[in-house]
Image (spheres, rainbow, N blue to C red):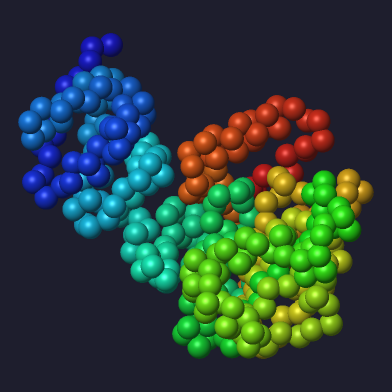
Amino acid sequence: MTDEFKEILIPEDVDRSELFGTMDKNLSLIQEAASVEIFQRDDSLLIKGEDVHLAEEILNEIIDVLQSGEKTDAQKIGYIIQLKEKGMSYKESGISKNIVCFTTRGKPIKPKTLGQKGYVSSIRNRDVVFGIGPAGTGKTYLAVAMAVTAYKNKEVEKIILTRPAVEAGENLGFLPGDLQDKVDPYLRPLYDALYDVLGRETVLRLKEKETIEIVPLAYMRGRTLDNAFIILDEAQNTTQEQMKMFLTRMGFGSKMVITGDITQIDLPRNRKSGLEVARKVLRDVKGIDFCYLSEVDVVRHEMVKRIISAYDKYFANNKDGKDGEWRNE
């Protein structure tokens, strides 16, 4: 097959370091995706190789994104490439305009993928939302950001975050300290997300006023929660009974978000995950949304995406204890 050639002019208002990436990382990703070589010539880029058209579209998309004022990183470049390979446009998707809120450092929190955009939209429009997907897809972080936004907009009066304290190979009884000290490590990811969005001092102040509660799931029994934004994290580690108990805590003016990863269940083998059961029981209930995120929506290091993909392929081909039922339906 004869190689094609194409030359693209680099606009003067485009930062070349953002376009090329650190040590030309962005160009390397494009070269790998389109099987091309990219050479810099003065104020232009020369593309040579198999799928020059794809490389050209990707570069033009990145240039458009940079001209709109956005920054780039490896995750965003990778996602632009994935969309272009499917004939879709990152810019036209409107992902970058969907700002949820700002961190204490002024950084905008917004969806980074179409899956995340749909997840945020569901949280805005539904009272009960299940966010199901692998690690690194922003399930918990975006839910916390939406909770903070709802509180700041006076849509709710309090924020409640909870997760089951399931022992993943460790034994709570052997951990040092009192009960709170023992369960705090399980709740740490929730603290981290809140600290990033609100700041440590604000979180501690609101926690003292009980405007924010971060508690183990067992503490939810017997309560009815009105005018609250309630997040259940690590829901795959709930039992059927715990999930039903949690869902029936919902009161007037409240919103619930349940997040979990069905591929990482730490329950004993004889216990069925409450998240798996809820997915089957509640799938047709009006007002409840199930949002499925995948490795495409991973916004952590590229290696996280590759690791998740490798595990998916392995368990798809090896039926040793994984029947594949957790896959998106």
Is residue 125 at least partly visible in the picture? no
Name the outermost residue toward the front.
176
Name the outermost residue toward the top.
1
Whole-percent x, y for residue 307 in the image? 59, 35
Quadrant of the snapshot with the N terminus: top left
- Horizontal side of 295 relative to 315 (left or right) equals left
For residue 47, above or below residue 116: above
Q: Quadrant of residue 19?
A: top left
Whole-percent x, y for residue 328 in the image? 64, 48
Whole-percent x, y for residue 305 in the image? 53, 39
Is residue 306 at least partly visible in the picture? yes
In percent of the image, x 65 and y 62: which residue is there? 188
In percent of the image, x 72 and y 65: which residue is there? 184
Q: Quadrant of residue 311?
A: top right
Whole-percent x, y for residue 9 in the image? 10, 37
- Of 257 and 148, nearer the camera is 148
For residue 148, above or below residue 9: below
